[in-house]
Amino acid sequence: MNKSELITAIAKEAKLSKVDSGKALDATISAISKSLKKGEGVILVGFGTFRIAKRAARTGRNPQTGKAIKIAAKKVAKFKAGAALAKAVK
């Protein structure tokens, strides 16, 4: 499912227009992104948890040359499915 299909599904489920559904989805994504940018997690009970994790610096290999390269430390977004979502997917 891509973003356009998701907007259509939201519009149908919530009985909203596609424009309003698109605005709601964009606002949700924006709010989650801003929270993660601040270093705060987002917990959606029954759905899952978005959080920031630190990935340590490490040494990797260039697959073309085999030469060792340094990979810098960085922060990454992680998602852990909640119990209800995990059960629904099972």
Image (tube, helix red, strand yellow):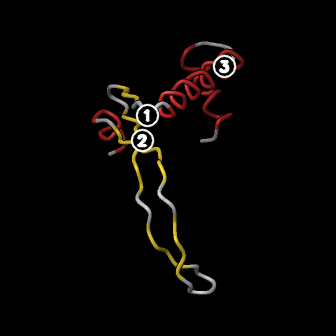
The amino acid pointed to by label 2 is Ile
Disc 2 on helix, strand or loop?
strand
Residue 6 x %, y %: 60, 32
Disc 1 on helix, strand or loop?
loop
Left or right for 71, reference 19: left
Along the polypeptide, which appears first: circle 1 or circle 3? 3
Q: Residue furthest right?
A: 19
| Residue 23: assigned label | 3
The amino acid pointed to by label 1 is Gly
Left or right for 23, reference 31: right
Q: Label 2 to label 3, Cα distance in Å?
A: 25 Å
The amino acid pointed to by label 3 is Lys
Q: Are marks 1 and 3 in contact (CB under 8 Å)?
A: no
* Residue at 48% across, 28% down: 35
Left or right for 38, reference 8: left
Instruction: Say which residue label 2 marks.
Output: 52
Along the polypeptide, which appears first: circle 2 or circle 1? 1
Residue 8 x %, y %: 65, 27
Q: Is residue 36 above or below residue 58?
A: above
* Residue at 44% across, 63% down: 57
Q: Label 1 to label 3, Cα distance in Å?
A: 24 Å
Instruction: Say which residue label 1 marks.
Output: 39
Q: Label 2 to label 1, Cα distance in Å?
A: 6 Å
Q: Nearer the viewer, mark 1 or mark 3?
A: 1
Query: For this rendering, which residue is in front, 90 or 60?
Result: 60
Along the polypeptide, which appears first: circle 2 or circle 3? 3
Q: Are marks 2 and 1 in contact (CB under 8 Å)?
A: yes
Left or right for 82, reference 65: left
